[in-house]
Image (cartoon, grey):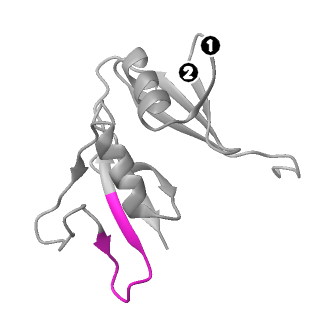
Amino acid sequence: MTLGADYRVITFIQTRDRPTAVAFYRDVLGLSFVMDDPFASVFDQGGTGLRITQIDGFTPSPHPALGWMVSDIQASIRSLTARGVSMKFYEGFGQDELGIWRAPGGTAQIAWFEDPDGNLLSLTQV
């Protein structure tokens, strides 16, 4: 099997409360809402689909579930914190006051935050 020339990537996030998750991804993160179907709420992330599915009793992973490459991580963080998002700080990582960790060699800057369900999300600037 091959994907063919017309494939598109889609990502998935699970939630315990779909209306709250939809509000966060639409109103706080600013993703483009596409539609609801009986199984998921669908967003467009610049050509990549995101399906948010409600699962009763869902427990998030401690590892990043979804992330975005941004051109200005500081501006992105300031925009998110203005909307009530708190960045995650990890003891011993040496993050700056905005929560940005710089990879050794300075090639990447990464910051983390959570959605309302505790899914770990990230921003990366290279």
Q: How far across and down, in percent of the image, does residue 37 sit?
A: 62, 13
The magenta span reads 101-111
Which residue appears at 50% of the width and 29% of the height? 26
Secondary structure of residue under mark 1: loop
In this picture, residue 72 sits left or right of residue 115: right
Front in this rendered view, residue 98 or 55: 98
Q: How far across and down, in percent of the image, does residue 96 sit?
A: 21, 70
Q: Which mark is residue 51?
A: none
The residue to which callout 2 is attached is 41
Asked if residue 114 can be seen in this view, the reply is no
Which residue appears at 89% of the width and 52% of the height? 5
Q: Residue furthest right?
A: 5
Front in this rendered view, residue 112 or 63: 112
Q: Quadrant of residue 123?
A: bottom left
Question: Is residue 53 placed above or below 121 in the rendered structure?
Answer: above
Crowd band around label 1 with a 10 angstrom C-alpha radius: few (<14), some (14–19), many (20+): few
In this picture, residue 63 sits left or right of residue 28: left
Asked if residue 24 can be seen in this view, the reply is yes
The residue under label 1 is which amino acid type? Answer: Asp
Q: How far across and down, in percent of the image, does residue 71 sit?
A: 53, 64
Which residue appears at 46% of the width and 23% of the height? 22
Which residue appears at 86% of the width and 46% of the height? 6
Secondary structure of residue under mark 2: strand
Instruction: Calculate the distance from the C-alpha at mark 2 to the C-alpha at mark 1.
Output: 6 Å
The residue to which callout 1 is attached is 37
Crowd band around label 2 with a 10 angstrom C-alpha radius: few (<14), some (14–19), many (20+): many
Front in this rendered view, residue 96 or 101: 96
